[in-house]
Image (cartoon, rainbow, N blue to C red):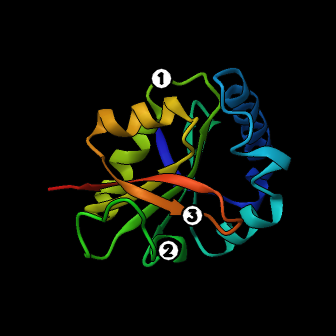
Amino acid sequence: MDIRLAENEDLPEVMEIYSYAREFMKTVGNPTQWAGGYPKREMLEDDIAKNNLYVGVENGKICGIFAFIVGEDETYKIIDNGEWHSNAVYGTIHRIASNGQVKGFSKICFDFCKEKNKYLRIDTHKNNKPMQSAVKKYGFKECGTIYTYDGSSRIAFDYIGE
């Protein structure tokens, strides 16, 4: 699979994958994490403009998406019930999703991000058991609780690569 920066022309496929991901989350007991059509097109356009949105492409088709941002994330400044395992410059993975047709997209994403920055952070909803499983399997360690811009809580994880 090739990972590349997303382009505005990718948005129809990207929006379809996020729609699929929202439905998938509902079926696995996580109906509220991306409710209300999150992420919005404007957010994705902003990610593209800042070179933060990536797509995984296989056989000419977009199979997965994620945002990867190196540098401080405002929502990670305060962490409750724990602490980060490092204060190094980190890369944050947000809004990872796939079309469900490629096995192991999260690992592909994590491997790609680890090559860009050895210290990674990610957060997920308490009901997102598939993502919690994926991050733990990869070697991310639970750090505590962070709060998103709307005040909802997320389980925070980090990974210190070699």
Q: Amino acid at mark 3?
A: Tyr
User: Which label is found at residue 147?
Assistant: 3
Sequence-earlier tag: 2 or 3: 2
Q: CA distance from mark 1 to mark 3?
A: 30 Å
To which residue does mark 2 refer? 73
What residue do we see at 46% from left, 70% from top?
76
Q: Amino acid at mark 2?
A: Asp
What is the secondary structure assignment of the residue under circle 2? Answer: loop
* Mark 3 surroundings: few (<14), some (14-19) or many (≥20) residues within 10 A: some
Sequence-earlier tag: 1 or 3: 1
Vertical position of residue 139 compared to residue 130: above or below: below
* Total labels drawn: 3
Q: CA distance from mark 2 to mark 1?
A: 29 Å
Vertical position of residue 9 compared to residue 130: above or below: below
To which residue does mark 1 refer? 103
* In this picture, residue 136 sits left or right of residue 130: left
